[in-house]
Image: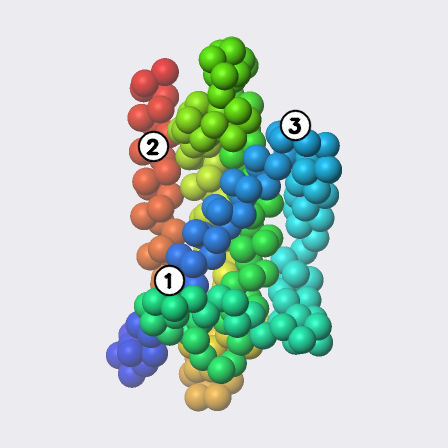
């Protein structure tokens, strides 16, 4: 408890930074996952091949490799991820506008990595939609885009909400390693700083950091379980 009393403000700041990072990554991964899922079932063969290649690559590549490439490869390619400095957004999430771009690099890596799993979770929901629904939509003249927007995706979201929740929980846990790739001020880097620079005991420091992650994942897990129970009752 002494560690929490003396460094409570640093833990609170680390939890806030981690929460912001995970919120941005979740939104980005959902957007990427939807686009890739639509591409994978597109009637255009090159889009299907591109979507399949994307999912195959990121699902079978370790997250650490993706983070290494984002943190150290993108700068060599001349990128500093300034396109994420969206006016208005960077004022809400101030780390997006800092001069050190590692927060943005790590965000890109986790979005691309998690987007592949979001795609597969959503595609399972699309496969759960009866084929007759899409055929009826085509029969009344809906285009592929209209079919996806008005018929298939709304039903797919309902079927995929539980696996999507599991993907987001896994993403939050995966974010624990971003502190080792230059992102400072979040929970894992806070624990590392307190043990290495301040000589605090390892077990209580890391235990408090773990509790910080549990504060984000446990409520989300409870919500996912309730949604699953509601769907089972409805069926």
Relative to 165, 52 lies left or right? right
Label 3 sits on residue: 43
Residue 120 image point, x, y percent: 58, 36
Foreground pick, 157 / 168: 157
Q: Secondary structure at mark 3?
A: loop
Label 1 sits on residue: 19
Q: Residue at x 43, y 52 (%)?
A: 27
Label 2 sits on residue: 227
Characterize the local packing of mark 3: few (<14), some (14-19) or many (20 or more) Cα atoms within 10 angstroms. few
Where does the N terminus fall, quadrant-wise?
Answer: bottom left
Q: Is residue 168 above or below residue 5?
A: above
Q: Secondary structure at mark 2?
A: helix
State the mark number for residue 85: none
Residue 50 image point, x, y percent: 70, 42
Among the two numbered marks 1 and 3 on one chain, the one whose residue lies closer to the N terminus: 1
Relative to 10, 178 lies left or right? right
């Amino acid at each position: 408890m002494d560690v929490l009393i003396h460094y409570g403000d640093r833990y609170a700041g680390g939890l806030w930074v981690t929460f912001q990072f995970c919120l941005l990554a979740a939104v980005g991964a959902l957007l990427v996952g939807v686009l890739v899922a639509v591409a994978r079932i597109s009637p255009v063969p090159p889009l299907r091949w591109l979507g399949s290649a994307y999912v195959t690559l990121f699902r079978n590549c370790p997250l650490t490799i993706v983070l290494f490439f984002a943190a150290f490869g993108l700068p060599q390619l001349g990128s500093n991820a300034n396109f994420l400095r969206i006016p208005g957004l960077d004022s809400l999430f101030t780390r997006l506008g800092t001069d050190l771009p590692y927060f943005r690099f790590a965000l890109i890596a986790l979005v691309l990595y998690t987007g592949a799993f979001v795609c597969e979770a959503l595609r399972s929901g699309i496969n759960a939609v009866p084929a007759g629904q899409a055929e009826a939509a085509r029969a009344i003249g809906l285009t592929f885009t209209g079919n996806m927007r008005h018929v298939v995706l709304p039903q797919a979201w309902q079927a995929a909400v539980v696996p999507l929740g599991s993907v987001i929980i896994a993403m939050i846990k995966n974010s624990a390693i971003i502190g080792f790739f230059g992102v400072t001020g979040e929970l894992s880097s806070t624990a590392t700083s307190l043990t290495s620079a301040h000589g605090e005991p390892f077990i209580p420091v890391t235990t408090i950091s773990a509790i910080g992650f549990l504060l984000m994942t446990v409520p989300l897990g409870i919500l996912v379980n309730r949604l699953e129970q509601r769907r089972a009752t409805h069926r």
